[in-house]
Image (cartoon, rainbow, N blue to C red):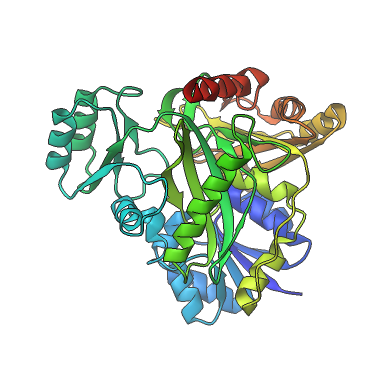
Amino acid sequence: METVLVIGGGGREHAIVRALADDAEVYALSSNRNPGIDALAAGMEIADGTDTDAVVDYAEEIGADAAVVGPESALAAGVADALDDAGVFTFGPTAEAARIETDKAYQREFMAENDIPGTPGFETFDAADAAADYVESIDDDVAVKPAGLTGGKGVRVTGDQVSHAEAAAYVRESGHDEWVIEERLVGEEFTVQAFVADGVVRPTPAVQDHKRAYEGDEGPNTGGMGSYSDAGPTLPFMTEADYLAAVDVLDATVEALPAYTGVLYGQFMLTAEGPKVVEFNARFGDPEAMNVLPVMETPLLDVVTAARDGDTLPEPTFENRATVCKYAVPAGYPTDPESGAEIEVDESTVAAAAEAGGGDALLFYASVDAREDGLFTTTSRSFAVVGVAADIPTAEAIAADALDAAGDGLRVREDVGTEELVQSRVAHMASLRD
């Protein structure tokens, strides 16, 4: 049996471990003890996933045949490079290839130089004052982005979240030097994740994430409060042509990055003119991995080993079912999350929700720490539930019932995947196309 090391301890990594556990002996390395991963893994090392020496030492200790890197911070730290140097194949890009995510200025310049479809208009700056002056000088609405990693919380959009003056003040006060200022894209966001190796791109179904903290798309950006996918590759507000146009963008990107290995995540805005690229990520999304992996019929291990052995990546197949993922987060998240609070998760409610709803319900632990004296919050999202059913409304109802697992001190964005929200996306897109 193959031995696979998974780096990371969030909900995304719990989903990855679950997808591998039936076919491989899985070990994990994370800074927190995720109880869901701990229950599935043959072993778990508590260490910093950006510590390349610690990662390599543990991979060699367990005799890893392959590794899968979950978080972008580990990719930026060069974990894939270090493992590859140690002779452990890593399903994840090198630090240089991961710049497609970790350096937004490089990302946009790469896209422009390689004529990647869907590239928005943009300007880059290497000084905060210059970027702020530019924001103040223009009338058009823009998206204001630090060039480096911000955990999905760094973007401010004028005409939506902030005024031009507020955006300029944010730039000056943030502590970041390098910035990307780009045209504000209007439409509906969606994600397509793809497995990539040897220039081959294998896309997965589209997912819509919900970044804003509160119902009705209000409040600050988060790492993602929940997401949904439909029974099939598209979403209700998309056409098949929209989906294929997004895949064309991923194909063009990989053609310009032929050595890329791992998951390439394209976040798109479906505009009246078609999909435009909001950003690329160099790994699975969190929560989007929890939508896609539970309905993937092709073993994830087959994808990893094909990439390792130089075989053509298999064409992944997926169950024709919809998914709705909803996160429970600590009180105060994302601006002032309550870390170190003891919480309780009633796993029995998840199984009961599945039985009552006529589908499946899955629980994925995320940024929690399981100690001898209980389960405690960190500063990030605590756990997610995923409803899986024949259609989105049924999957949403299952997820909503399963959220009874969340005890005191946790908050949920209740509208993720609801019929009202999904139909508002359909109506919005129809109005833009008209």
Q: Which residue is drawn at 59% across and 29% down?
A: 237
Q: Residue at x 54, y 43 (%)?
A: 191
Q: Where is residue 283 in the image (x, y as percent from the top left)?
A: 52, 55
Q: Where is residue 372 in the image (x, y as percent from the top left)?
A: 64, 48
**How many numbered discs sit on the rendered protein?**
0
Q: Toward the viewer: 336 or 399? A: 399
Asked whether, in this view, residue 2 is left or right of residue 278, the answer is right
Q: Residue at x 66, y 50 (%)?
A: 15
Q: Residue at x 57, y 75 (%)?
A: 89
Q: Toward the viewer: 22 or 203? A: 203
**Residue at the limit of the structure toward the front, as seen here:** 434
Report whether residue 69 is seen: yes
Residue 282 sits above or below residue 356 on the image = below
Looking at the rendered image, the quarter that the N terminus falls into is bottom right
The quadrant where residue 384 appears: top right
The quadrant where residue 30 appears: bottom right
Asked whether, in this view, residue 51 is left or right of residue 370, the answer is left
Q: Position of residue 412 (x, y in %)?
A: 58, 26
Q: Where is residue 166 in the image (x, y as percent from the top left)?
A: 23, 25
Residue 353 sits above or below residue 297 on the image = above
